[in-house]
Image (cartoon, rainbow, N blue to C red):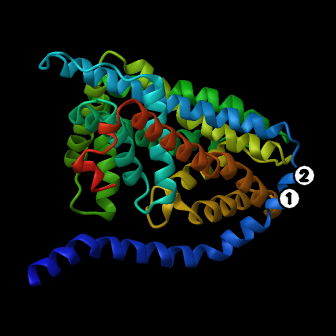
Amino acid sequence: MRVAGGGLVRRWGGRAVGLAITGVSLYIVAPSLLSLFGAWPRLADVEPWWFPVLALLETCSFAALWWLARLALTQQADDNAVDEAPPPGHPGWGTIATAQLAGNAASKVVPGGAATGSVVQAKLLIQAGQPSAVVASAVTAIGLMTTGVLLLLPVLTVPALLIGPPPARQLELGLLVSLIMAIVIVGLGLTALTWSRFVVVVGRAAGRIIHVVKRSVTADSCAAQLVTQRDRVAAAFKGRWWAAALAAAANRMFDYAALVVALVALNAHARPSEVLLAYVVAQALAMVPVTPGGLGFVDAGLAALLVVIGIPADTALIGTLLYRLVSFWLPIPVGLLAWAGWRIHRHVTNPSRTKAPPSLGDDA
């Protein structure tokens, strides 16, 4: 009984602690969530044609992720085919989109955030016939690529923030800024993937900064770790580097463009660079797994940051709600429908394969 009890504690203790943290966090952000939800009726004041524009931008952002996933899975499958007979087939667009949508929905409703979403995404891809090693390498590379782009954005906003104020109605230029930033990201991405010296210099510079607050990190250790991660990404997208960099940049920039359009729809006025910085901070908050998908923290943080950069509080609140409607809330039912359709399709075509692999099924 003691062994069984200990196993039960080990199995469910961590989950109980995680749920407790999530519950406390939701309680803390409850006032901001209630304020946000109370503003829903004011969305009726937004011109109806803005909604399909926002949905299109978010669809393009998701499609860029599907493209990135297909690049990684195709490359990993080709590399794996050297040692396998017959080689695994390349996954179709429908399979990749379904897996990503289901994983994204899981990351927004289940504690664990991106980690849980990655498990669900990997589970569906493995069920579709992709080797587990291929899926694991591809999912890791995708995470490193998209996170790297996110970390790059604040650095690129610094020059724009140092320049004097642009014209009064400058927020409309945010769409042009997103295109320019995408081009710059692709260029820097290709440089990092092909030029090791550049990665070493960046890693050493970052290491010196980090060493000030964390003495155990040195310039050399940070550079070595950065090169190791770069090598993993470079290997995952070998021969497809420019396409991978473009897909990762498009994923972030279409999402940022959706935030810009949400504010333009409300006739808000702000500098695109400052909106970009607010966007980056909000995305960073979403990566902290205290609530599913950063629920509450992202909403409150983004609205507060928009107020800081000069947008009126009411406009910032409605703009945040409009953006989160298409980037957070709408993808949840879409992902659940994609997952349900996948399960039904598998049950109809091959009932004996509806069960998930034990290794991933137990975790999910």
Can residue 166 be seen at all in this image of the molecule? no
Label 1 Cα neighbours within 10 Å, binned few <14 / some 14-19 / many ≥20: few
Q: Are marks 1 and 2 in contact (CB under 8 Å)?
A: yes
Left/right placement of residue 81 relative to residue 39 reads left
Left/right placement of residue 247 relative to residue 74 reads right
Identify which residue is drawn at 84% across, 60% down.
41
Query: Nearest the camera: 244 or 341?
Result: 341
Label 2 element class: helix
Q: Is residue 56 above or below residue 48?
A: above
Left/right placement of residue 261 relative to residue 324 reads right
Image coordinates of residue 114 in percent, x first then y, are: 42, 51
Label 2 Cα neighbours within 10 Å, binned few <14 / some 14-19 / many ≥20: few
Image coordinates of residue 43 in percent, x first then y, are: 83, 54
Disc number for residue 355: none
* Amino acid on which the number 1 mark rests in the picture: Arg
Image coordinates of residue 214 in percent, x first then y, are: 28, 63
Quadrant position of the N terminus in the picture? bottom left
Identify which residue is drawn at 51% across, 58% down.
109
* Amino acid on which the number 2 mark rests in the picture: Asp
Spatial separation of the CA atoms under disc 1 and disc 2: 6 Å
Query: Nearest the camera: 252 or 81?
Result: 81
Quadrant position of the C terminus in the picture? bottom left
Query: Nearest the camera: 52 or 236?
Result: 52
Q: Is residue 239 above or below residue 288?
A: above
Can residue 140 be seen at all in this image of the molecule? yes
Disc number for residue 42: 1
Disc number for residue 45: 2
Label 1 element class: helix
Identify which residue is drawn at 13% across, 77% down.
4
Identify which residue is drawn at 63% across, 32% down.
178
Image coordinates of residue 123 in percent, x first then y, are: 33, 42
Q: How many marks?
A: 2
